[in-house]
Image (tube, rainbow, N blue to C red):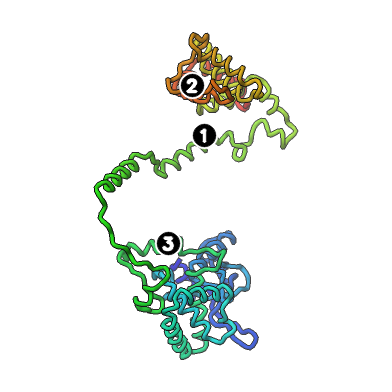
Amino acid sequence: MEDIIARMQDEKNGIPIRTVKSFLSKIPSVFSGSDIVQWMQKNLNIEDQVEALHLGTLMAAHGYFFPISDHVLTLKEDGTFYRFQTPYFWPSNCWEPENTDYAVYLCKRTMQNKARLELADLCAESLARLQRAFARKWEFIFMQAEAQAKVDKKRDKIERKILDSQERAFWDVHRPVPGCVNTTEADIKKSSRMKQPHKTRKSVYGLQNDIRSHSPTHTVTPEVKEPTEDELHDQIQHCQEQLDRHRLKMSKVAESLLSFAEQYLEYDPFFTTPEPSNPWISDDVTSWELEACKEAGQQRVKRWAFCFDEVMKDPVGREQFLKFLESEFSSENLRFWLAVQELKKRPIREVPTRVQEIWEEFLAPGAPSAINVDSRSYDKTTQNIKDPGRYAFQDAQEHIYKLMKSDSYSRFIRSSAYQELLQAKKKKSKNLF
């Protein structure tokens, strides 16, 4: 951003800075918001006006230039006048102004009898709050503000007007009005920390440490107590638990998301025109007719190979999967899962009877279609059927789902039945669901 500002301030190719005459006064060293946008589009190869406004707003929010008559640091493409900030107040100087500095600034503003320097309601409230917080040291703060005001009076009138606006803009960055972006929270000093690893706080007005130590935000550091042996063991255990936590690198997450998007690209109507067309948009009802029939198109069959969920949420997919399991004489798992799903939709008065029927068919000793569940799920289900409800078989259902996903599904996708189904649909049509 500072490189762009340096180019903006270039005498030959920069933004033209001028003095504007107004009623009974002059406004020195200003330029308009439209000047900034036009310069960015011309010199930064920005074609979109919205992008130029966004970049300019970011630079204004960091305080590199500011509106001369507004506390809200944003860029508008109109005749609003702006002024460049002096490099002394740039964020790259790693400012961390204290509340005492802000108190000196507000106090100094009250000493200057200028209408343009009158405190806004928010600033007046801040001054009153700081005056209460620094009641014991307020005399010293007042003396500092008075000394600063005397120095300012010795400056040229135009120079004083420019410096006053730049100082106000500095505090608009570090003490923004409610509703504005606080760029200091984003830690814009990261790039400078590597160059200044031993950076310390510094005062804007050169206040001594004795006054700043009484800041309401400053607390005395307590004495560090040596950790006990038990506390050290707890810390070690906590660190080991953190090491064992499953974490994914952002690169792997992004790669997975890209792979998912590419896999489902042809099924996304935002990117690929659906064939047949959407019946809600066009008058073609072919899509509804295909969905109603029991035969699945090539795209629909191909989608079953993506994951087990695609098979289970497709009625035709479940039917074909059931036929495959019946051919292997292992359909009881899927029939149990479907029965439990159907149970959840039953009227409450029919639930107890249906729970007992499912139990006797799949889980009771000597059941005709016994399923293989682990002991934990079986014990939990045994407890649940004493008070039968729609979710009495939840644990057993989840266990069976995982078994089918890890074993039966992979065999179904590799089976000749699925391959024949896929090839048959390819021959029939390439564009049916």
What crowding class fits label 1: few (fewer than 14 Cα within 10 Å), some (14-19), or many (20 or more)? few
**Residue 380 numbered tag:** none
Q: Amino acid at mark 1?
A: Gln
Question: Are discs 1 and 3 less than 8 Å apart at CB?
Answer: no
Q: Residue furthest right?
A: 283
Work out how far the residue at label 2 is from the one at label 1, CA to CA, in angstroms: 27 Å
Question: Are discs 2 and 1 less than 8 Å apart at CB?
Answer: no
Count the marks.
3
Q: Quadrant of the C terminus?
A: top right
Which residue position is annotated with label 2? 400
Q: Residue 23 location in percent, x, y?
A: 65, 86
**Residue 187 numbered tag:** 3
Question: Are discs 3 and 2 less than 8 Å apart at CB?
Answer: no
The residue tagged with tag 3: helix, strand or loop?
Answer: loop
In the image, residue 384 above or below residue 228: above
Which residue position is annotated with label 1? 263
Q: Amino acid at mark 3?
A: Asp
Query: First in sequence: mark 1 or mark 3?
Result: 3
In front: label 2 or label 1: 2
What crowding class fits label 2: few (fewer than 14 Cα within 10 Å), some (14-19), or many (20 or more)? many
The quarter holding residue 195 reads bottom left
The residue tagged with tag 1: helix, strand or loop?
Answer: helix
Query: First in sequence: mark 3 or mark 2?
Result: 3
Q: Residue 119 location in percent, x, y?
A: 56, 78
Q: Residue furthest bottom?
A: 154
The residue tagged with tag 2: helix, strand or loop?
Answer: helix
**240 left or right of 54?**
left
In the image, residue 86 above or below residue 184: below
In the image, residue 329 above or below residue 385: above
